[in-house]
Image (cartoon, grey):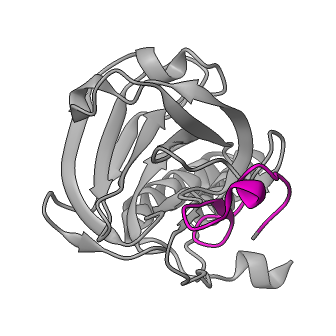
Amino acid sequence: MLKSVLVPINPAGWPFIAIFAGITMLLWWADEGLGLVGVVLTLWCVYFFRDPERVTPTREGLIISPADGVVQLIGKAVPPLELDMGEDECDRVCIFMNVFNVHVNRIPIDGIIRKIAYRPGRFINASLDKASVHNERESYLLETDSGARIAFVQIAGLVARRIICQVQEGQPVEAGQRFGLIRFGSRVDVYLPKGSVPLVVEGQIAIAGETIIADMKAKKTEKQRTGRTG
């Protein structure tokens, strides 16, 4: 338990931790009971912005989960139109993050960021399928050395109000590399290249930078197998 709590804090969290701590001091001055509530909330804020190290599988062709959370949905869907990937459906894996998950997002595979597109929107429950269309989002198009194109999308949720992007178009990236985060509670969708089949199942817990969600090098019989990986 201590190992999961006493981990590095993402730099984006320090301003919020400072605000929570300042409010806690004022609450404590006004009333000890309120001050204790403030302490609990401040500790939760520290926990929310934790940024643990991860050990990322390195074999070529593996697609790694970009987010911690539950695999909420798996199915066919059209990638975000703003990425100009066409209107053909491909396999999509949706990972829902609640307010207790690590919210630092990681690159799913080695490649180059070809396009980043922000789209404003609503803040409905991110666990709903329609959140992919209606909610605020930041979409990324990545191209691998082999020419495969993968899209992944940060989607704001019911209480999320800020998507943070930490990469740029044209930037080479590596699987497991941090590329951003979302505050507070949200979802990340991954649109797999044609020919890839998800290796996770709905309800499975995914770990950003570690869980294998697909394998572009797998044989057909292996691709058809789903189950717990990573």
Image coordinates for residue 76, horizontal then vertical, percent: 58, 26
Q: Is residue 224 magenta?
A: yes
Q: Main secondary structure of the magenta part?
A: loop
User: Considering only vertical position in the picture, is 90 above or below 60?
Assistant: above
User: Considering only vertical position in the picture, is 165 above or below 17?
Assistant: above
Task: Using residue 129 as the reference point, say whether residue 153 is left or right of it.
Answer: left
Residue at 21% x, 38% y is 117
Assign the N terminus to one quadrant of the image.
bottom right
Residue placed most toward the observer, 121 or 201: 201
Image coordinates for residue 173, horizontal then vertical, percent: 30, 73
Task: Please provide the residue range marked out in magenta.
Answer: 206-229
Residue placed most toward the observer, 4 or 116: 116
User: Considering only vertical position in the picture, is 127 above or below 226?
Assistant: above
Quadrant of res 45: bottom right
Residue at 82% x, 49% y is 204
Answer yes or no: is residue 209 visible: yes
Assign the C terminus to one quadrant of the image.
bottom right
Residue at 14% x, 57% y is 169
Answer yes or no: is residue 158 visible: no
Image coordinates for residue 105, horizontal then vertical, percent: 48, 59
Image coordinates for residue 216, horizontal then vertical, percent: 54, 61
Quadrant of res 79: top left
Q: Is residue 130 magenta?
A: no
